[in-house]
Image: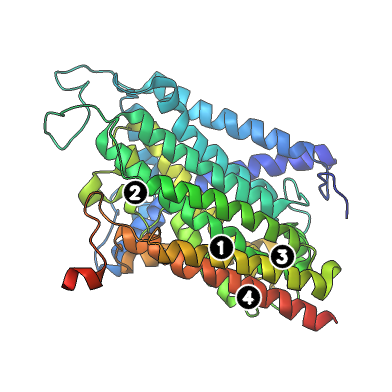
Amino acid sequence: MALALAAEGPIWPLGVYFVLVVVLAAGILAFSYVLGQRHRQQATDVPYESGMTPTGGARLRFPVDFYLVAMFFVIFDLESVFLFVWAVAVRELGWAGYVEVLIFMAVLLAALAYLWRSGALDWRASGSKPAPDKERGQ
Amino acid sequence: MSQTTFYILLIVVLLAALLTMAAGLIFLERRLLALWQERYGPNRVGPFGLLQVLADIIKLLTKEDWVPRFADRPVFVIAPAIILVATMLSFAVVPFAPGLCVADLNIGLLFFLAMSSLSVYAVALAGWSSNNKYALLGSMRAIGQMVSYEVFMGLSLMGVVAMTGSFRLSDIVAAQERMWFVFPQFAGFAIFFIAGLAETRRLPFDLPEAENELVAGYHTEYSGMKFALFFLGEYVGITLISALIVTLFFGGWYGPWLPPVAWFIIKTLIFISSFILLRGSLLRPRYDQLMAFGWKIMLPLSLVNLAAAGAAVLLKDH
């Protein structure tokens, strides 16, 4: 299998297409900049918060769960890339490769099971993590 | 016709078709939703309300092109452009008929996955640069959701890759001449469809812009054509996911009697309509349910599906 980036036809159309798409997006933005109206009123420069006067900026602290999800994504997406490589060469690698991939997947699933059990996949409102059911009943 | 003219023509036609498609989908969606909800939908401008889209475009173009003072100006302007560029670029690798493809890359499927990941940036940057609480909350939800569903979106397609032995989309279509991959890879299809819904942030996965709690989520502060670019990106995204479902699972251009391109378009339109029907019929889940569904059910399921597909391929060959 060739390692280089190869297309059935020539590769330059991709470049032309990319340039044209960027030009299109820039053109739409420029066009509306020229055609658009302008106005200034009392509340123009206030962030929209359903008509309330905003208190404080939007640089808030938000739940750490989002950060956790980002970490899981890096871990699992990176691991899935190894599976991509295997998938394209299943036939060449045969059963030996298959068993190795099964072990790899088992490790992946074990990591997922660990995250599941430790409660990392359960989404709760911040600051209101309830105690496990057993303890709550007592 | 020389090769150069052929490709230039193809690119221009593709761009025009995509823009028409995205604009037409807004009309189609409103009419279909109206049909299913027993009302008329837009029917005032032009015959059957067909010119409604044109009227909308003129309106959006003359709306104020507003960049809030409190926003991060360059990022705020670039964000909506990213989503359009990323989704439109993916179409470069989609084969519409034999030989009818802008660039039939040998890594076509990886190219699509890479480009669809890029649209996360648009949402993240839009929400952050708006400096608005609703926008921030919406974009945080969107990032969490898109990133989670992306993990198994790629994995769900690997069953198809294992059966074909290639990332090239035209090879994958050619391998389906006898049997569509939806039959041996139904689980893969179902997982990809659900992940595609989440990636395009369509109902039932439209929590990032849930109107009744977050106003409009990450595009709360956007107006005029920048606001429209997000929708253009969304509708091109729906077309893209539908086109890929057709390419990967429903035999792409194959079909009797009609020319290949016609079959491709018909099949794609069927899936686009199903996207709209889903919007008209399903409820929005809670955010914790959405995340739990992705990580606890879909991810293990896609791994099991891939393992089964690999075993099936090897059993057939050896």
- Quadrant assignment, res B56: top left
Tell me which residue sits at (24%, 45%) in the image: B214
- On screen, residue A25 above or below B42: above
* Total numbered badges shown on the rendered structure: 4
The answer to whether residue B252 is left or right of residue A6 is left
Q: Distance between the residues labelled 1 and 2?
A: 26 Å
Q: Badge 1 is on which residue?
A: B268
Label located before the other in sequence (1 or 2): 2
- On screen, residue B186 above or below B77: below
Q: What subunit carries mark 2?
A: B
Tell me which residue sits at (45%, 43%) in the image: B232
- On screen, residue B97 above or below B135: below
The answer to whether residue A48 is left or right of residue B301 is left
Label located before the other in sequence (4 or 3): 3
Q: Which amino acid does label 1 sit on?
A: Thr
Kindly indicate whether the residue at mark 2 contacts the one at mark 1 (C-beta within 8 angstroms).
no
Q: Badge 3 is on which residue?
A: B161
Q: Which of marks 3 and 1 is in front?
A: 3
- On screen, residue A44 above or below B305: above
Q: Badge 2 is on which residue?
A: B208
In the rendered image, residue A1, in percent from the top left (x then y), is placed at: 88, 55
Kindly indicate whether the residue at mark 1 contacts the one at mark 3 (C-beta within 8 angstroms).
no
- Quadrant assignment, res A22: top right
Q: What subunit carries mark 1?
A: B
The residue at the far right in this view is: A1
Q: Which amino acid does label 4 sit on?
A: Gln
Q: Badge 4 is on which residue?
A: B185
Q: Which amino acid does label 2 sit on?
A: Pro
In the rendered image, residue B50, in percent from the top left (x then y), is placed at: 39, 51
